[in-house]
Image (cartoon, grey):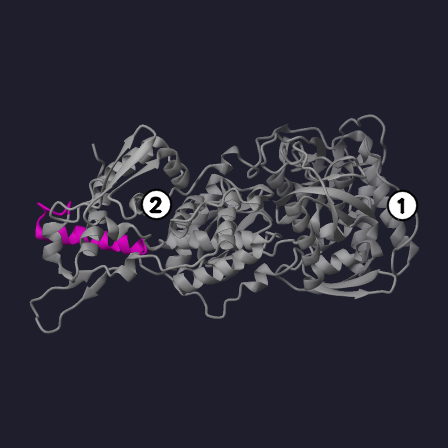
Amino acid sequence: MASRDDDKLVRQLSLIAFLMSQQRPVTADEIHEAVEGYGGMTEQAFLRRFYADRAEIESMGLRLAVERPGDDPFQGDLYALPPENYYLPELDFDEAELSALQTCLYLLEGQFAYAEPLRLALQHLTLGRPSPLDDRAARTVSVNLLGGDYSPEVAAHLTKIESAISRRKTIRFTYYTIGRDERAEREVDPYSLLYNAGNWYMIGHSHERDAMRIFRLSRIEGRITFKTRAEHDFRAPADFDLSRYRDRAPWQLEGPEQTATIALTPTIAWWVEGMFGAYGTTAMEPDGSAVYTTRYSSRRELLAWILGLGADARVLDPPELREAAIAALELAAERHQGGGGRPAPPAAPAAGGAPPAPASEAAPPAGGASAAAAERVVPAERFARLLALMTRLLAACGESAEAQIPVAELRQALNLDKRVLEDDIGLLNLINFGGGCYALFAQIDGDTVVVQKETYGDRFARPARLSPLEAKALLWALDFIGDRLPIEAGSSLSSVRAKLEAALGGDSLPTVELGQAQVADTGVAAAVSHAIREDRLLEIEYWTESRGAITRRTIEPHLLVNAQDAWYVVAYCRRAEGQRTFRLDRVRSASVLEERFARRPDIGSAGPYMPWGARPPLGGETVAQSASVWCAPSLARWMLEKHGSRERFADGSVLVEIPYASEEWLVRELLKYQGEAVLFEPVGLRRTVADLAEDVLARYRDGADHPSGGQRRRAPTR
């Protein structure tokens, strides 16, 4: 038995079919009489239903043409659906561009909130062309765009906020302000979405503060609602500039700014210039060292970045920032002294920096990766899916009156299970042009769909226009992947976007801003991509951040991986005689060698180790060690957003679990927290953290303008 939604779909699709079959504009009375689903209604009921259907159809991107005759005052409006308002404009994509589009879908599958509309859009764009999904690019690249706080709730918030932005609707929601540790009701005019480093943000005018504010979507609790039922609630200011929110370093938040100068060793000066040159100026010295000058408003964020560079960076000015760095290093060294047996937890973090006795067992923290994050949160628009399915079935007939299509092909193309495909085909069989004329008759016969093209079938053998959501999903996907793909497909995506923007027009452009991805030097990226595609050896100069050294290596590059806006190459390192993962922005130079290598089936198949221990979703289980770290109350809330906790304490401090695969990475990571994060276990690394803090302190006490030279302690490895 058909549902009310099914009846509405058949009625709306029959209305489109009737208008497409006519060679002239028609009256409302003709629609009332001829279109399936309107018969038997009173005139008033028909008019209400017709105007509602028309609005929904136009929201799908299919705009009806309306004529108002001026010579006859008794003549009502005339309606038509011109072919140019229905058919998708011709888009001439070459094979490289189609491959790039398919690579987008391949990479975003399972982690993109709009993956289903994206799939439908690509079905329209690639109709009649062979699928290039077996392209080498798709098999040698992996992209991970899901931040630690991505969840089905965040994806649902994305949909609601995007709708509010496009409709200029004021929204209400409950928001957790992590800095003040409080929840409050907010009323906001949303201007844009911002994606940065794996997290989603909304930028808008806060009515409570009467000022611009940034809201992290993972901190929105419960439902988002519209303030009014009006069509529009606000108008975005014409001079609103999102670049000030997007193109800035973490330490360049809003607020009073100061200027800092940092001395850099030759080991990292080149890297800072390449990665952070846009946020300051770098004065290079003949020996390769440098002085980096940057504006900052968040002292904590700037110190975290500087201390994370270890002994290769030292604050010169201002004096108060330098003194804060020294104080943080002294506190970290003091709290990590002693590397004997496990210390007994004292009542407060003092000697040895061990955590206080637990007050209670902690519930899992808000945020964090969710197993449900990969679920498809935004379902495909069924209306658009039915149009895509009808187009595909009729296009398969070509000049013939009948065609057979494998069920598996349709299910894979539209991402449907067999039951849903059967239901959709059943609905398509009911679409009536009026007078008993249909577009097609189809049925599933075993593993095949048998299609018979009816009288007006040719009218729907070409793709329909993209719905606004499909168009935005497509452009969003290009934005997400385009700047994050250091392979040949990147240039093809740029040309695809230009063609789509020209065809779709400005009304369909997405209202979202993307933060800058951390990409390698273009020459390095090109060399790595070339070597991967041709299975050639690659010689690299690589800066190992945890050891503060640059080494020359010969590697067999197998796979490119993107995680949290940074690119990695997974390779077999001939020097280490094993699989290693190298971050592209730390490759100082790369040269493709003539020698080719045979691909190793065990490299990349289970996923590479990331510095923090988690693997990208390439099919293998997560393998990492875990460190127990005590966090002071001033740091606890931020750490709970990223890491799990087993224990919370009465003073507000917590004990979190931080996964890691590299001990050197863990030691430097702890230094970033300026003594407010203390390693509890493994006990053997506590002395190493103190040693690194003392090593950096020694550079400050030396008083040299450029902290280069001298022997450094190396963290022990297991």
Question: Residue 236 falls in which quadrant of the image?
Answer: bottom left
The kind of secondary structure element at disc 2 is: loop
Q: Is 42 covered by the magenta stretch? A: yes
**Is 73 in front, or is 231?**
73
**Image depth: mark 2 or mark 1 in front:** 2
Determine the main secondary structure of the stretch shown in magenta.
helix
Q: Is residue 39 left or right of residue 440?
A: left
Which residue is under mark 2? 381
Say which residue appears at 49% left-offset and 53% top-offset. Answer: 95
Q: Is 38 covered by the magenta stretch? A: yes
- Give the residue type that dot 2 points to: Glu
Question: Residue 503 falls in which quadrant of the image?
Answer: bottom left
Q: Is residue 493 left or right of residue 692?
A: left
Rate crowding at label 2 as few (under 14), some (14 to 19) or many (20 or more) other CA atoms within 10 Å.
some
Which residue is under mark 1? 712
**Is 673 in front, or is 148?**
148
The magenta region covers 36-61
Question: Going from the N terminus, do you reach mark 2 or mark 1 first?
Answer: 2
